[in-house]
Image: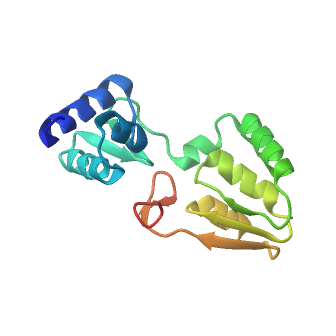
Amino acid sequence: MLSANARREEIYHLAVTTGLASVEELSARFEVTASTIRRDLALLNGQGRLARTYGGAMALGAHPEASLRQRTGEAFEQKHAIARWAASVIRPGENILLDAGSTVGALAHELRGFEKLSVTTPGINTMQELADSEGIEVDCLGGRLRSLSQSFVGPLAE
């Protein structure tokens, strides 16, 4: 078993070489809890060595993460095709959890006319899309607002 410092160095090395490291993958790789990995990532982030992402971290300058606004315009037709398909398999009365993201925002747009649907989300774009939908109950996950993804992250959101 690695020391905490050795584990953090290995996490940093993985992020630099692969560009992105997820909490789940790192937890399994190092055989420690997800909470331990989150603390490691927070420390590396505080040192300016890694940037936190939703569910993990990436090396600074390795692959800059695009903002939600930027991603919304990318692959527009494909995202909306995925959203239409996903909406077609959702049935009235279901309870669904929608993560944050541009494709999920397109799905939320497709769901606006649904009746008797319960949606739980950390994504501001999903909340905005469904805010005026009277037939949809929207439960919002709290946490720390991450401006880049326009979503709530952290232990409360998880």
Left or right: 65 as drawn, with respect to 113: left
Please, is residue 71 above or below residue 158 in the view? above
Image point 20% across, 49% down: which residue? Answer: 43
**Residue 73 picture location, percent across and down:** 65, 41
**In front of the other: 95 or 73:** 95
Location of the N terminus (image quadrant): top left
Please, is residue 57 above or below residue 106 in the view? above
Quarter of the view holding residue 62 = top left
Left or right: 114 as drawn, with respect to 119: right
Image point 48% across, 63% down: which residue? Answer: 157
**In front of the other: 152 or 67:** 152
Please, is residue 4 above or below residue 107 in the view? above
Left or right: 57 as drawn, with respect to 103: left
Q: Residue furthest bottom?
A: 134
Image point 58% across, 60% down: which residue? Answer: 123
**Residue 138 picture location, percent across and down:** 68, 71
Numbered label tally? 0
Asked if residue 10 shows in the view, the reply is yes
Left or right: 107 as drawn, with respect to 149: right
**In front of the other: 124 or 89:** 89
